[in-house]
Image (cartoon, rainbow, N blue to C red):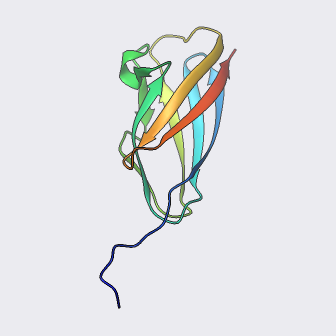
Amino acid sequence: MSSQAKRGFEYLDIWAISNSRSEILINVKNIGTIEAIITKILIEGKPLNAVNGGRSNPRTPIYLKERGSETIILNFSSSLPAGITNMVLYTYSGKEYPKTVVIT
């Protein structure tokens, strides 16, 4: 048997919705063949905590096993502006997963 590390790929399927102007729900599923680790979340190119006191539950890093899923709740201490908001989830492997959310 080979001593090589398990080879595979990560791929996140992301669905996001704004519940209110101060909360975003993100459903993430790892449909890849190896574990994925979300290391940071950016909103409009800024770290989450720099946008209206943003924080995530669970906090990063977020581990997603192969075929695993997680609901991430982003909360903000003050309302986000109405309109289109861009966010990006970054993983330990260096991949970026952009998503657009409409804030109403």
Image quadrant occupied by the N terminus: bottom left
- Residue closest to the far bottom: 1
Closest to the observer: 83 or 56? 83
> x and y percent of residue 62 in the render?
40, 47
Quarter location, residue 61: top left
Residue at position x 55%, y 60% in the image: 32
Quarter location, residue 97: top right
Indicate whether 39 appears above or below 41. below
Closest to the observer: 95 or 101? 95
Residue at position x 50%, y 18% in the image: 44
Indicate whether 99 appears above or below 63. above
Residue at position x 43%, y 15% in the image: 51
> x and y percent of residue 69 in the render?
55, 54
Indicate whether 33 appears above or below 93. below
Image quadrant occupied by the C terminus: top right
Residue at position x 59%, y 59% in the image: 31
> x and y percent of residue 87 in the render?
53, 27
Horizontal side of 75 relative to 15 (left or right) equals left
- Residue closest to the far left: 3
Horizontal side of 5 relative to 57 (left or right) equals left
